[in-house]
């Protein structure tokens, strides 16, 4: 059922990686980073650029975390994130290491960004081309043309206030919240994203098309704050891109930057405990029993899992078990990875296949916590853009269904195959007739894998649901509320999930972690 790594499955550093790593002078402060997802690697590059000696510890046998790469039958499967926006955030990281991202990874623009296929067979091509996008709106509902313009203007406003002004700022104190409150008030952030869209647009299909993007960050459009309409503006401004060779190429590139900066990446190194003395993180202990001393510790793991399983209860006055349990957590995912011996050229790179229900299905996922008999799918076909992801003449895919997290009580060992068959039936009936006779690779990932393999609390794929009262200052802080010298990056801390959010969480560390030299001077002055 599950994928396994084979002799063909290797991760390699890019050509521009420096073959000889620089040496750190004695006494250089040491940062240990738990997890090598985008947040962990981006943090490592940023800290190394500030003079820190950096060690990244990865539980799995290769870097990436949710951006891990699987290989089977000559197919290359990106495990998780496949929609790349805001490329300048990657360019910044390469520049910090004295490199150019384009020398290692080509980002190819997509048009359309993705296709939204409704249950009745109609579709909406979601595009970055303003004229094409307006034409699609008018085709479905001419009377909504003016409302769509108003929606875009409000989304642009939320992008300016929510992403540009607040995204890379660590919400560290109540004062930070007070300073941000006027912007949140101006965006009327208490409204749901769907309610904000509905105030401008009347046609139900267009309301869906302009609000389902929050699902990409684990948020229910009917409850997530409308601030996340900024995703629409972000995509229009920066485009949607594909990393040629797969998202894993970005992971390899960041690992290469870290090596060139003198950092260390260790795989098969699971952290079992964050070691704390006198209220301060002093390092970590691995599952093997090895202790690694550190001046600071950054967790790129799930924050709820980190606090509950890696920080002893006596060190947690804020993130107690009770507070963790009371949180409202995002959906999880069922993902079927498969390859075919023939190509389906009518299937675009990204397709959202909506099921017969929308709002009620989301209630089943987010509120009722039940595995529904119906579902919607995100179908990813990278070979529509990049032939290197499959053997010649083949296609590579994954079909992803949002499902509830493990509070459903679903026995995924029993349910995975029936779910896969149900997904196959929908694909066969809609966009890929007869494809099961062409399979050349197949494996699945379930919410149980998110819990067991990726160490996500409740198997939730995105941490806490991005509600208004679980965002910004109310989300787990980038600088731990409980432990000095402990920091958080990734999808489950501020500003939230999605590749831009994760990269911005690493950027937010700049406001709370000083340059290594300043840190060393301050510690020396304290006699530590």
Image (spheres, helix red, strand yellow):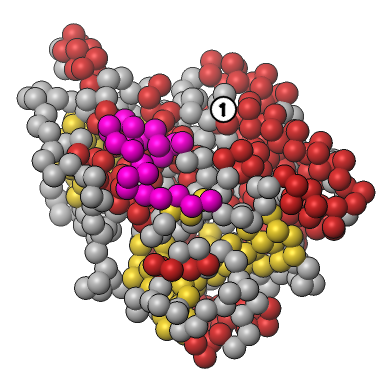
The residue pinned by badge 1 equals: 164
Left/right placement of residue 403 relative to residue 374 reads left
The question of residue 408 being in magenta is answered with no
Q: Residue at x 46, y 36 (%)?
A: 88
Relative height, residue 221 to residue 507 (above, below): below
Which residue is at 22% across, 25% downward?
51
- Decide if residue 510 is in sight here: yes
Q: Is residue 398 above or below residue 394?
A: above
Q: Residue furthest bottom?
A: 437
Q: Secondary structure at mark 1?
A: helix
Label 1: how many Cα within 10 Å (few below 14, some 14–19, many 20+): few
Is residue 367 something that shows in the picture? no
Which residue appears at 54% of the width and 15% of the height?
175
Query: In the rendered image, which quarter contains the C terminus?
Result: top left
- Horizontal arrangement in the rendering, residue 409 relative to residue 480 (left or right): right
> Which quarter of the figure is the N terminus placed in?
bottom left
Query: Magenta includes 108?
Result: yes
Point out the residue furthest to the right here. Answer: 143
Where is residue 287, by image quadrant? bottom left
In front: 72, or 296?
72
Q: Position of residue 251 (x, y in %)?
A: 34, 50
Query: Seen in the image, is 218 located left or right of residue 289?
Result: right
> Residue 400's x, y, as percent?
55, 66
- Taking the view exactly as shown, the residue that stands out farthest to the left is 26
Residue 306 vs residue 519: left or right?
A: right
**Point 33% across, 38% down: residue:** 100
Q: Residue furthest top?
A: 525
User: What stretch of residues is rendered in magenta?
Assistant: 88-109
Q: Is residue 215 above or below residue 237?
A: below
Residue 107: x %, y % from top left: 45, 49
């Amino acid at each position: 059922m599950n994928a396994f790594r084979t002799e063909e499955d290797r991760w390699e550093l890019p050509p521009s990686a420096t073959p000889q790593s620089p040496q750190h002078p004695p006494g250089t402060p040491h940062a240990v980073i738990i997890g090598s997802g985008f947040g962990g690697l981006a943090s490592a590059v940023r800290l190394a650029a500030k003079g820190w000696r950096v060690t990244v510890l990865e539980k799995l046998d290769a870097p990436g975390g949710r951006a891990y790469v699987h290989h089977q039958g000559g197919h290359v499967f990106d495990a998780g994130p496949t929609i790349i926006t805001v490329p300048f955030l990657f360019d910044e990281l390469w520049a910090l290491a004295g490199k150019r991202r384009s020398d290692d990874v080509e980002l190819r623009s997509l048009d359309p960004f993705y296709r939204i296929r409704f249950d009745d067979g109609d579709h909406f091509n979601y595009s970055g081309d303003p004229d094409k996008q307006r034409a699609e709106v008018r085709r479905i509902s001419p009377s909504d043309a003016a409302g769509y313009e108003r929606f875009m203007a409000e989304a642009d406003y939320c992008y300016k206030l929510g992403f540009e002004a607040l995204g890379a700022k660590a919400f560290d104190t109540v004062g930070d919240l007070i300073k941000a409150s006027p912007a949140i008030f101006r965006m009327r952030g208490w409204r749901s994203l769907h309610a904000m869209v509905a105030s401008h647009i009347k046609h139900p299909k267009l309301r869906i098309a302009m609000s389902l993007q929050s699902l990409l960050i684990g948020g229910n459009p009917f409850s997530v704050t409308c601030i996340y309409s900024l995703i629409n503006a972000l995509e229009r401004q920066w485009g949607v891109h594909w990393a040629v060779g797969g998202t894993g190429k970005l992971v390899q590139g960041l690992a290469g930057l870290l090596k060139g900066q003198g950092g260390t990446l260790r795989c098969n190194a699971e952290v079992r405990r964050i070691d704390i003395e006198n209220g301060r993180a002093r390092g970590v202990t691995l599952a093997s029993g090895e202790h690694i001393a550190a001046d600071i510790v950054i967790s790129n793991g799930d924050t709820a899992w980190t606090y509950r399983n890696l920080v002893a209860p006596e060190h947690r006055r804020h993130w107690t078990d009770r507070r963790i349990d009371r949180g409202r957590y995002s959906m999880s995912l069922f993902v079927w990875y498969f390859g075919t011996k023939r190509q389906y050229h009518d299937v675009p790179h990204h397709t959202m296949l909506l099921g017969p229900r929308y709002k009620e299905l989301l209630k089943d996922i987010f509120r009722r916590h039940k595995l529904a008999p119906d579902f919607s799918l995100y179908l990813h076909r990278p070979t529509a853009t990049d032939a290197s992801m499959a053997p010649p003449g083949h296609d590579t895919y994954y079909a992803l269904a949002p499902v509830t997290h493990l509070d459903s009580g679903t026995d995924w060992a029993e349910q995975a195959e029936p779910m896969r068959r149900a997904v196959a039936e929908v694909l066969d009936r809609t966009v890929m007739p007869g494809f099961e006779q062409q399979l050349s690779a197949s494996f699945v990932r379930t919410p149980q894998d998110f819990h067991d393999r990726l160490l996500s609390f409740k198997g939730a794929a995105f941490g806490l649901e991005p509600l208004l009262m679980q965002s910004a200052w109310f989300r787990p802080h980038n600088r731990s509320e409980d432990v000095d010298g402990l920091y958080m990056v990734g999808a489950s801390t501020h500003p939230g999930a999605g590749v831009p959010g994760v990269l911005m969480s690493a950027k937010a560390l700049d406001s709370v972690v000083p340059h290594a030299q300043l840190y060393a001077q301050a510690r020396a002055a304290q006699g530590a």
